[in-house]
Image: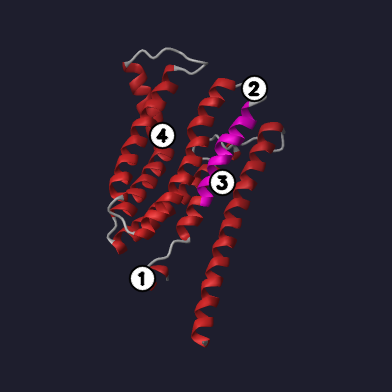
């Protein structure tokens, strides 16, 4: 009985730890959002490294960390469970890390738009349409890979994948849809707010993702420790 209560207490403490971690991540995200607003609408901060839109700014580096941890932890799960499904998710988050850090879809989108004459639609430039094409192709590739390996996965990895798909869809809404909407509705006054919704939304969704990945049960106590 004592051993059972001890196991329950440890499990409860782990759950509380994940909740606290998630709160810390989200609080940090909110801090970056507030700094972005101060930078955008006041003279108190002049360095654009505090902008959510700044490449390799403080908030984007924090996003790199979350993507790296997600890829790493899912990779450990893949090795431990010999799971191609977890491996597919690990590679996906590693791609997101590379895409954010070296701008893969932006560079490939520019290359594609230079090869094809995409017409301008609703203020969307040819390069914007090129970026959409790249995002669609990459999304299709990972969707197929995850779909194939889903059929081979165990019950736990399938349940995890269902949750990750929902979270990834939410991430895509901010990262792709809101990005294009920002281009369409861009005005000097609205730009900081649109950036806040787009990049701030990405920050918070990625925080939920990495905390969800941290909460996944690992079969080896050595990996947990």
Label located before the other in sequence (3 or 1): 3
Mark pair 4, 3: CA separation: 20 Å
Observer able to see residue 72? no
Please provide percent x and percent y for residue 97. 41, 44
Label located before the other in sequence (2 or 4): 4
Q: Quadrant of the C terminus?
A: bottom left
Observer able to see residue 197? yes
Q: Which residue is mark 1?
A: 220
Horizontal side, residue 152 vs residue 163: left or right: left
Mark pair 2, 4: CA separation: 24 Å
Magenta-colored span: 191-208
Q: Secondary structure at mark 2?
A: loop
- Residue at the image point whose x is 34% and y is 56% from the top: 75
Up-down: is 55 above or below 28? above
Label located before the other in sequence (2 or 1): 2
Q: Which residue is mark 2?
A: 188
Q: Which residue is mark 3?
A: 204
Mark pair 2, 1: CA separation: 53 Å
Mark pair 4, 1: CA separation: 36 Å
Up-down: is 222 above or below 191? below
Instruction: Give residue 103's mark.
Output: 4
Please provide percent x and percent y for residue 65. 47, 51
Q: Secondary structure at mark 1?
A: loop
- Is 105 magenta? The answer is no
């Amino acid at each position: 009985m004592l051993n059972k209560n001890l196991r329950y207490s440890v499990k409860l403490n782990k759950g509380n730890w994940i909740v606290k971690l998630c709160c810390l991540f989200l609080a940090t995200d909110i801090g970056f959002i507030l700094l972005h607003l101060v930078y955008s609408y006041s003279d108190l901060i002049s360095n654009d490294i505090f902008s959510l839109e700044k490449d390799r700014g403080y908030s984007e580096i924090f996003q790199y960390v979350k993507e790296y941890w997600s890829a790493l932890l899912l990779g450990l799960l893949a090795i431990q469970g010999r799971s191609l499904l977890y491996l597919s998710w690990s590679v996906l988050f590693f791609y997101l890390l590379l895409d954010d850090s070296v701008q893969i879809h932006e560079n490939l989108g520019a290359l594609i738009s230079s090869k094809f004459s995409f017409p301008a639609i609703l203020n969307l430039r040819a390069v914007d349409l090129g970026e959409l094409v790249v995002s669609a192709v990459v999304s299709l590739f990972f969707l197929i890979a995850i779909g194939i390996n889903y059929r081979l996965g165990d019950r736990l990895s399938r349940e995890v994948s269902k949750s990750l798909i929902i979270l990834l869809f939410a991430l895509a809404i901010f990262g792709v849809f809101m990005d294009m909407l920002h281009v369409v509705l861009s005005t000097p006054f609205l730009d900081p707010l649109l950036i806040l919704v787009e990049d701030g939304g990405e920050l918070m969704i990625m925080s939920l993702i990495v905390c969800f990945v941290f909460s996944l049960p690992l079969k080896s106590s050595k990996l947990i420790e």
